[in-house]
Image: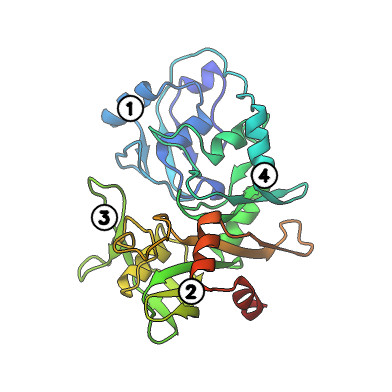
């Protein structure tokens, strides 16, 4: 159901269902998408007083939504018409062009740089979603995110050019018909060299930001199942290993948390102790890269299969340890 637009419609309570392409979106970002003229301060007041509900319960601006949930929107005041979409600068357009690995009439695949956020926050002005808003003519036609990567994770990011395409791709991600391969450099060498990590995760927010951890006994109700396949491609003695990671599920921080649980945190991962005692000359940045993604084209014709080149800090690390990208690529074909 689309968001009410007219003064009469907005004067009544509305119940909207969260779309497949909105799965995982923060509630404040969801309101920004559907009610772009609603001031954030007004939204916060509606949340504090319980007038906005998600599946009948109270929620916060930071609440992450799931597809199919129902959002109760109270009567909203009449406001000025929505502002026109923000214009992209030449620098913004150049950034998008430099990131684009693949594009057709339905979708784009970007190579997101490490350090660029996918979605905005209170202290994040530049992010991928802001660039996408600048490309569209409105909620139905503007390009939109299909999935997410952490700010410090680089690599392939799929963008749908229309809401209808996003819904199809969202279903593909949910049914696990999307193949994803990540590369990582981790501390030490996992044993055995190939295996599967099955560790349910729970959120563990704290003063240092969001994290996840392994679920403890009694936490099954709020735990999310998470499964990752891993393989050691190469190693530098017992100090560092080059890993190929294949997530079966797509939980927040899944790969980072799973490697930490295994006892081999990813190099440069400040949230999971991978930034401690780094080898000399290695950048203190997260060494996790979404290397490759493949999925059936939403048109029903053919397969999209895209590989993203490594970011500069991982290129330097590969050279320092003598790792060869072609070895992993050859083993995945």
Q: CA distance from mark 2 to mark 4?
A: 27 Å
Figure check: 168 above or below 274: above
Closer mark to the observer between disc 3 and disc 2: 2
* Inter-mark Cα distance, 1 to 4: 37 Å
Q: Give above or below for 37 relative to 48.
A: above
Is mark 3 in CB contact (under 8 Å) with mark 1?
Answer: no
Q: Residue at x 26, y 55 (%)?
A: 204
Which of discs 3 and 1 lies nearer the camera? The answer is 3
Query: Which mark is first along the chain, 1 or 3?
Result: 1
Q: Is residue 141 visible?
A: no
Of labels 3 and 4, earlier in sequence is 4
The residue at 47%/77% (across/down) is: 230
Which image quarter is the N terminus in? top right
State the image coordinates of residue 152 (x, y, percent, origin top left): 45, 51
Q: Nearer the viewer, mark 1 or mark 4?
A: 4
**Whole-Å distance between the Cαs marked 3 and 1?**
23 Å
* Residues tagged 3 and 2 counted as in contact (Cβ below 8 A): no
Q: Secondary structure at mark 2?
A: strand
> Quick one: which residue is furthest to the left in this view?
218
Distance, label 3 to label 2, CA atoms, is: 26 Å
Q: CA distance from mark 3 to mark 4?
A: 36 Å
Residue to which mark 1 is pinned: 44
Residue marked by disc 3: 204
Observer-side mark, 3 or 4, equals 4
Helix, strand or loop at mark 1: helix
């Amino acid at each position: 159901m689309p968001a009410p637009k007219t003064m009469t419609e907005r004067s009544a309570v509305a119940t909207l269902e969260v779309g497949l392409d909105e799965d995982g979106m923060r509630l404040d970002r969801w309101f920004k998408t559907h009610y772009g003229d609603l001031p954030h301060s007004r939204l916060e007041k509606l949340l504090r007083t319980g007038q906005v509900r998600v599946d009948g319960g109270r929620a916060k601006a930071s609440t992450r939504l799931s597809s199919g949930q129902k959002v109760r929107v109270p009567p909203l005041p009449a406001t000025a018409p929505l502002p026109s979409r923000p214009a992209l600068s030449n620098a913004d357009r150049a950034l998008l062009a430099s990131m684009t690995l693949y594009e057709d009439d339905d979708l784009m695949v970007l190579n997101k740089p490490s350090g660029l956020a996918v979605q905005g926050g209170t202290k994040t002005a530049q992010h991928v979603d802001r660039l996408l808003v600048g490309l569209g003519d409105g909620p139905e036609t503007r390009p939109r995110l299909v999935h997410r990567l952490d700010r410090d994770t680089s690599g392939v990011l799929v963008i749908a050019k229309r809401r209808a395409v996003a819904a199809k791709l969202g279903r593909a991600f949910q049914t696990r018909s999307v193949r994803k391969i990540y590369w990582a450099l981790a501390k030490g060498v996992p044993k055995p060299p190939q295996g599967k990590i099955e560790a349910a995760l729970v959120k563990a927010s704290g003063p240092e930001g969001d994290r996840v951890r392994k679920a403890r006994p009694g936490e099954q109700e709020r735990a999310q199942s998470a499964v990752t396949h891993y393989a050691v491609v190469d190693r530098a003695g017992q100090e560092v290993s080059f890993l190929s990671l294949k997530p079966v599920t797509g939980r927040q921080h899944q790969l980072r948390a799973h490697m930490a649980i295994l006892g081999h945190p990813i190099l440069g991962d400040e949230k999971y102790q991978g930034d401690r005692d780094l080898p000399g000359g290695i950048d203190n940045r997260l060494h996790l890269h979404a290397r490759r993604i493949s999925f059936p084209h939403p048109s029903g014709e053919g397969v999209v299969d895209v590989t993203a080149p490594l970011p500069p800090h991982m290129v330097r690390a590969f050279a320092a340890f003598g790792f060869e990208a072609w070895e992993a690529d050859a083993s995945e074909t």
